[in-house]
Image (cartoon, grey):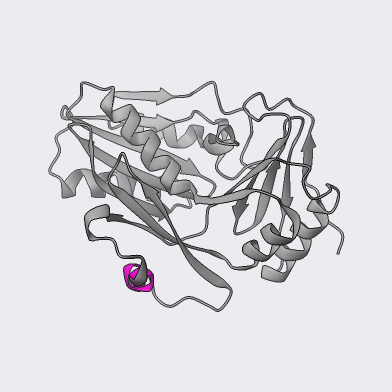
Amino acid sequence: MEIGRLSSMPNKNKDIPFNESSIHLFVNGFSFFTHSKTEFIPITKDIGDLESSLQELLSFYPKGAFSKTQIITYHQPSTFVPITFFDKNLLPNYLQLFGTFDEDSGLNFDTLEKENQVNVYTYPKVILKILNQNLEKASLCHYNSLLFKEVNKLANSSDKEYQLYIHLQKKAMDLYLTQNSSVIFQNHFSVQNKDEFLYYIFFVVEQYNLSLDQFEIVFLGEIEAFKTYYQSVKEYHNTIRFEYSKGCALDIDHHPAPFFAKFSN
């Protein structure tokens, strides 16, 4: 199969060492990062399309070309379990509320020691096969693990009692609510338009009985494609700020979750 390259951007990824790489996996394709380039490769068919596309891409690089490769998956579901209650033998139980999984899905977990959480999630099984065949040293994690750590770090540096963190993706968003620097709510929502976007924000605010002067809205990244969402929430709330507004150079066609383009090593 021939890979359909949507883009190949010869920009320097200063956050990636010369001999390392990163692959971000989405349901509709994957982004590939090296020190010298960034490209998004769309997947239009099924899991077999993902496998053949990844194999073809990595065949251009001899095994051992990268000393380290980080694989970040954006597949759902993902759920957090306090370390105290976590048992790796019960992985399917933690995700049973999300329904059954097909034979192409595997289960994995990331341990967040500092945050005292474990993130349990699904991923395409074919990834393990590809990693073993093509890469010397690779690690797999879920974007939500990185997001939880980022929110926790930002919340600990704020003097606001409540903060609502919003991470926008193409047709989706993640909401994190913190109180006194601790995450008290986290969820992922599918979002098709600004009305759905506002609905989920108001849902969280009402669930916790927050008045407008009690909380601050924090957007992670400032991306042109989400401008209408930013403007819509400003009609109802005026305590808004952006984190890493200058660190998101890619648009949603090059990376469906542009804020995470900086997490490429």
Q: Residue at x 64, y 62 (%)?
A: 127
> Is residue 62 or residue 182 the one in the foreground?
62
The residue sitting at 67% across, 51% down in the picture is: 30
Q: Quadrant of the N terminus?
A: bottom right
Nearest the viewer among 148 and 199 is 148
Q: Quarter holding the C terminus?
A: top right
User: Bounds of the magenta span?
Assistant: 90-96
Q: Is residue 161 visible?
A: yes
Q: Is residue 58 above or below residue 257?
A: below
Question: Residue 31's x, y, as percent?
Answer: 67, 46
Residue, x 46% and y 41% (percent of image)?
168
Give 35 or 192, whichever is nearer the viewer: 35
Residue 47: x and y, percent?
Answer: 67, 69
Q: Position of residue 15 (x, y in %)?
A: 62, 27
Image position, residue 217 (x, y; %): 31, 31
Q: Quadrant of residue 131?
A: bottom right
In the rendered view, tell whether residue 9 sits above or below residue 138: above
